[in-house]
Each structure stands twice: as structure tokens, then as C-alpha cells.
């Protein structure tokens, strides 16, 4: 199953609302997770089951979708949110990742 | 607090076998609620799932690497391991180990270890 994220690059300002989309090549129900990765660090789980916030993750992060189209929304960007975001499907093996979306400061 | 730590050589010669171990502390690798996985990330590129293993020894591999990958588990040491044979420069990457919850996703990760393939 291929995952395609859009956009690949996103430039935004502190306080902006941003949305990242992840499209699956076939239906994956709600078996989708979102990760945040900062340079030199391991990815951090943000959202699982498409819309469930991982413990400790700020509520400005939210996820939605099912089937083949999913979104990650950050309601009000904070300085620490500038990072690369990946989606991952866990519906079937191999559990593939999207190519990533790099969120940069405008 | 669960912690995962990768260990192994940082430099491997072409055509040889890359071997890494992930040591799990603060929790049991034998829990029925989790799988344990390996993921890699070439410099400047995205994430690639390599494979996963259950404490019973059941394994799942990425078809693109399956012919070269072996993942094993040692419950007595609370460790799981990765072997990747016949490596080339294309296998140069940061290798991560992670816990895979059957209900959620990859919720705990090691810090990652850079493995460079070079003569």
C-alpha cells in the first residue's frame, strides 16, 4: 500500500492553522498513524487510529479520515512544531510510511 | 518508563552482514500486546519499515528486503536483533528499533544508530 503525503513542503507562521493530507493507494480503514520527527531525533507518535491523540501530545494536533484519505491538522502552530511529519499505515504488511512533509517557518 | 537502545557496529564493509541489537528496558519484550520492529532512514530521506517480530518469534518482513533480512528475539535477555546480509552503500542509514502496539502504532522508539556501509 502506497501512501502519498501532500504537500511535501509547507511554509507557515507561528499561529497558523495547517493541514497535511495522506492518501492511501487502497483502503486502510482507520489504521493510520502520524509521527513528528525533528532533526537528529527519532520519530514521535502523535496520532494513532487516524484520530486518537497519543498521551501527552498537545490538543492543537488532530487527525481525521478513514479509508483512503486522512488529514493531520495543527490548529495554531507553535515554534516547536516545525519539523517533518510522516503518516504510516498499519492495516497490512508491509506497514508503509508516507514520504514526509517538512514544515518550515515562513 | 520503557526504553529501547540500539547497539552494534557503526561501520560495515560492502557485501558483509549488518548486525544490530535492540535492548528493551523498563518493560517485558514478552508482552502479548506488542510487536517489536526495525525501521531505517537513509541520510536526508524518509522512513522505511524493515520488519517486525512478536515475542513468540513470528516475523514480518518488508518484501523489498526479505531475501536479506533476519529478525530474531531473545526473551531471556529482553532483546531483539536485526541481521541484514550482503549490504551495499544503499543500506547506509540510521537504524531505529521501536515497540509496535497492536492497538496503536509505534509508540516507543530507540534513539537510532547510524550504520555506514563503506570499505
Image (cartoon, coloured by chain):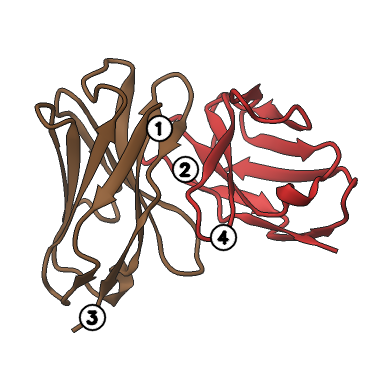
Chain colours: A red, B brown
Q: Are marks 1 and 2 in contact (CB under 8 Å)?
A: yes
Front disc: 1 or 3: 3
Q: Is residue B84 above or below residue B73?
A: below
Q: Which residue was labeled with disc 3? A: B118
Sequence-wise first label, 1 or 2: 2
Quadrant of image for the N terminus of chain B: top left
Q: Chain of mark 1?
A: A
Is residue A99 shown left or right of residue A66? left
- Assess whether mark 3 and mark 1 are in contact (beta carbons under 8 angstroms): no
Q: On the image, numbered disc 2 is attached to which residue? A: A1
**Of B42 and A13, the residue lying toward us:** A13
Q: Secondary structure at mark 4?
A: loop
Q: Which residue is mark 1?
A: A92
Residue at horizontal 75 percent and vertical 27 percent from the top: A59
Element carrying mark 2: loop
> Chain ID for label 2?
A
What percent of the width, then of the height, locates residue B5? 30, 44
The disc numbered 4 marks a residue on which chain?
A
Residues at marks 1 and 2, CA–CA distance in whole angstroms: 8 Å
Q: Label 4 belongs to which residue?
A: A39
The chain that hosts pointer 3 is: B
Amino acid at each position: 500500500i502506497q501512501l502519498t503525503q501532500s504537500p511535501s513542503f509547507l511554509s507557515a507562521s507561528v499561529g497558523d492553522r495547517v493541514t497535511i493530507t495522506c492518501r492511501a493507494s487502497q483502503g486502510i480503514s482507520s489504521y493510520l498513524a502520524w509521527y513528528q520527527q525533528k532533526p537528529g531525533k527519532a520519530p514521535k507518535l502523535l496520532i494513532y487510529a487516524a484520530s486518537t491523540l497519543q498521551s501527552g501530545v498537545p490538543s492543537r494536533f488532530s487527525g481525521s479520515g478513514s479509508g483512503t484519505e486522512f488529514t493531520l491538522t495543527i490548529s495554531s502552530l507553535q515554534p516547536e512544531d516545525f519539523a517533518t511529519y510522516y503518516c504510516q499505515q498499519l492495516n497490512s504488511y508491509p506497514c508503509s510510511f508516507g514520504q514526509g512533509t517538512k514544515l518550515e517557518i515562513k | 518508563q520503557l526504553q529501547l537502545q540500539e547497539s552494534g557496529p557503526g561501520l560495515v564493509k560492502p557485501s558483509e552482514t549488518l548486525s544490530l541489537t535492540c535492548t528493551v528496558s523498563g518493560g517485558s519484550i514478552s508482552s502479548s500486546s506488542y510487536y517489536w520492529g526495525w525501521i531505517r532512514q537513509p541520510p536526508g530521506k524518509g522512513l522505511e519499515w524493515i520488519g517486525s517480530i512478536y515475542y513468540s518469534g513470528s516475523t514480518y518482513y518488508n518484501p523489498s528486503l526479505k531475501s536479506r533480512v533476519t529478525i530474531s528475539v531473545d526473551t531471556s535477555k529482553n532483546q531483539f536483533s536485526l541481521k541484514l546480509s550482503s549490504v551495499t552503500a544503499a543500506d547506509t542509514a540510521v537504524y531505529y528499533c521501536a515497540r509496535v502496539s497492536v492497538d496503536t502504532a509505534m509508540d516507543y522508539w530507540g534513539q537510532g544508530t547510524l550504520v555506514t556501509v563503506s570499505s
